[in-house]
Image: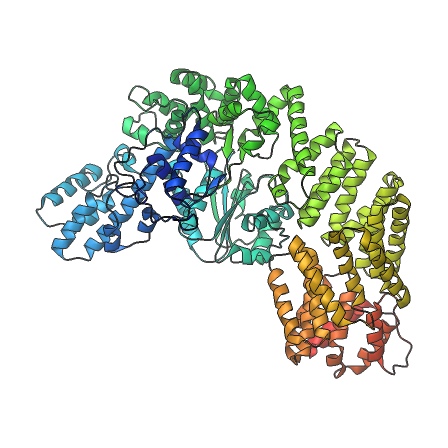
Amino acid sequence: MTASTPPTELRTLGDLHLGAFRKVKSLLMLAYVALEGPTPRRDMRTLLWPRARQPESSLRVALYVMREAAPGALEGEDRLETAVSCDATRLLTLRGQEALDAYPGAFLAGVKVGDVSPDFEDWAEDWRTRLARHVQSEAATLAEASDPAHAAALAERAYRMPGAPPAEPELLRRLLAVTLPGSALEAELRAELHALTGPDDEPAPAPVRAATRSGRMLGRSEPLDALLAWAARPGGVVAAVSGPGGIGKSTLSRELLRELTRTGRNAVLVDAEGARSSADLLPRLAAARAPGQAVQGTWAGLAPLLGDAPVILLDGLDDLDDLTLLLGTLRRELPGVRWVLTGRRRRLGQLARPGQPDLGDLLTLTLSGLDVPPPDADLPEIAASSAVALFLREAARVRREFTLTPGNAGVIGGLTRRLLGHPLALALAASWLRVESLDDVYARVLTEAATLSSPGGDHDGRRGLMLVAQRSWELLSPGEQDAALRLGVCADFDPADAPALGVTDTDLDGLLAHSFLETYQPGSERLRVYPALTGVLTAQAQAHPELAHAARTAHARHYLTWFTAQAPESPPVDAERGNLRLAVSSAIRDGTLKASTVDHLLAHYDRRGLLGSGTDVFAVLADEAEDAGAPDDIQAATQIACMWLAYRSGRLLDAQTLAARFLQGPLANDPASRMKALNTLGSVRGQQGQYKAAVELLQQALTIAEHLGDRVRVIMYRTNILSHLGFGDDIERVRQEMAAIESQLSEFSDVFSTSVRRLLIQTAMHLPDADLDVLSSEVSRILKKFEGTGDLNNFLICLTYESYIKMNQGKIREAQAINLRLENMLKSVEDPEIEIDLALLETKLLYARGRASEARLHAKRMLKLIFGSSNPWDTVELFMITALDIHSEDPVNVRAFAASIAHNQNTHFSHRWRAKALAGEYTAQPSLLDIDALRAWLEHRLNSL
């Protein structure tokens, strides 16, 4: 048996084995991964070896034994995965007699699991119940369709189903209807039904019913069921789940994700904590669906990544500034998606008010505390309370022997009432049992009971949480307090980084035991401080400023040192982007930030395609640097990064304003900074069609680069100037500049030279005497290089070149295939310029294929794109493509506009000589080219064709 061929099915029903292999802990580990999906090692250690002196060693041994006996069954290191099928998951897909035949016994029946955590025991019990109830329901359904004798046998089998909890009244009634009159089974079923509902089939007192109900999600079954039912309906709508911090919104989101995934639904959970805008939120979703890839998506462009009928959970929308605008965008651009939004803000619960966007089938849920037992509750009713169940579960983490007894039930019930059933408050209070008795815990909470809610209401447990959190802080050891402050600085963190942050494994485990940390990303080991506890940590940081400063300094030093050693586009950097943002802010305040680090961060956002979010991030950093009185090079670097990313994201007016203001200020006195700002403004002017101004600005930047001896920027600025010289008359100078640039490329790396040669091709393919065969070979060569390096932007640009060249060579079918490839790639990548280039190419291609009517329709749609473009080149090119078609309807205006283009000095030379031929013998004095008039005329003529 090889590692590539996993063993046969894992058996968990009535037994536990994988073929002849029967090692319990190894198989329990495999069963958990098979049923729950990829699982971090840390989670597995906690679940199966909670009290082992060296849990990692125990895990390692169990893995070794498994992999020796069944190679390929359990793969992965940090995250354990399996391709082995499991009889339990297969059972859930079976119906009728097949389900009964596939159920030899209860889940893990008779298996001595040994010393495992309460969480694992709960997990096993949940699966045991779920599987048994599935088969029980199938048996009942089958009985209802069978002859009397067979039906009675099936009813008895359903009633005595191994692993099933006590039957509910509804099931008992179903089974009674198919039993034989006067049989022993009928008497037994009727007696049990009367015990539950009373002799007149009325509901029994609440304590008895509560004792038999499922504890799924510990009191969150109703909102979970509501969300599942809402998600099952067709169409794209919004569900909003709100509630105070620590109330269980994230837990509910994760359970909803698991339920949807188990049923094969396309679902994804996105951590939205800290996201300030949709520009920041969008790449998080793109990364969640395409991890490790440089994806600069639009909301509409994400559709291919999301699959059919997707459900997207955005968890923690508390810092988002443009929620209303975002919801309108989602409804418009992704109408088929169901969105689940969670957050502490009350406005999430008020989305249905007048004035809000039309959200269709809106579902709003407000979470409050778990159900608590009334003061006069008896033991069964106390045991049935979700709040009590949660407290007991958390208490068992720190005191294994802790259980509910008649002696402590009243105290536990009272404690849950005092804390209003708030889940995180209960978990924190349970952690106190490490150091004090239950009576002392209750007395402490009781003392503060009068302040647990405000006079005007506010009975949601927030005040109780803060009081309990403060007491939990006091119970931490000095080392654990230090660790909490250090980790509280992080957005989140990989446990492997804890030592570098000054946190020992012992203190890390202590914070986990005290419920200060949570694992919040399914399938990841990353941890974070509960967001609901940041208020307590902030207060402690203010009370211990030296310790807080040391924590921020260690955090910034670790993450910035690590980051600057990585390539800016390295995928692992994505996971630490939140920490890098915080680290840069700390370094700004401390005066330790280097301008080279700012440039490195700019390169990350630029190369990963995070242009919109990067613009927003650097706008904040620039303000922070100015407020902190940071050195001039730091202030300049942050401002230049902001203006450059604004330009790259198409926000030309913003980039123009920022660059112009910078050049008028004192920071522009530094030559290197002035050079970069001039380059940005020159690039903006070029996009705006002001080519003469662009060349003048870029020439100033080039002069500074030559003075500074910056050879790379000399080449870069020369190529930028070259691209704008195409809008002049001096073709010979264009050729000379190309030759000068080519002669210097041997001094540079292959990666850099390839990028420059791409820019040379852009100019060369529009020259009157271009050798298309040579250019085609050169484009094919550098396409392979860009594909190999993962440079998506340059790769897409070269595809447009290849399509243009093939079309001009008359290779229409090849050009069509290239366009189709571009169209598919642009569904998940945001690049407005390439979208316009592709639309122009496709319009030209349709005309070349003799499909004029389709080309006209495409040109009409094209107008909507170019109306949003500030580059007049697009309008002129569309005119040139459609001119022959329109000429038959309006030859006078076609020749007039062609003459204006031919005599306009801001028009590309390739357009001028093509327009000159189109104008023919036009003898009137050409008017100045008015792009707005040309667009309006094009729209009118295309609509009339």
Residue at 56 percent of width and 51 percent of height: 290
Is 407 left or right of 553, judged from the image as shown?
left
Q: Is residue 239 above or below residue 124?
A: below
In this view, the residue in front, 497 or 697, is 497
Picture quarter with the C terminus: bottom right
Q: Quadrant of residue 53?
A: top left
- Is residue 422 among what the camera can see? no
Is 738 left or right of 940, judged from the image as shown?
right
Is 876 left or right of 3, judged from the image as shown?
right
Count all numbered tags in the image, as a single digit. 0
In this view, the residue in front, 521 or 395, is 521
Q: In the rendering, at what x and y percent does residue 789 appear?
A: 66, 53
In this view, the residue in front, 330 or 353, is 330
Q: Is residue 282 above or below residue 481?
A: below
How is this picture coloured?
A: rainbow
Q: Quadrant of residue 784?
A: bottom right
Q: Quadrant of residue 61?
A: top left
Q: Is residue 257 above or below residue 730?
A: above
Q: In the rendering, at what x and y percent does residue 454 appear?
A: 51, 26
Q: In the rendering, at what x and y percent does residue 260 appear?
A: 43, 49
Task: Name, please, the residue furthest toward the left.
Answer: 182
Residue at 11 percent of width and 50 percent of height: 180
Q: In the rendering, at what x and y percent does residue 733 appear?
A: 90, 64
- Is residue 891 among what the camera can see? yes
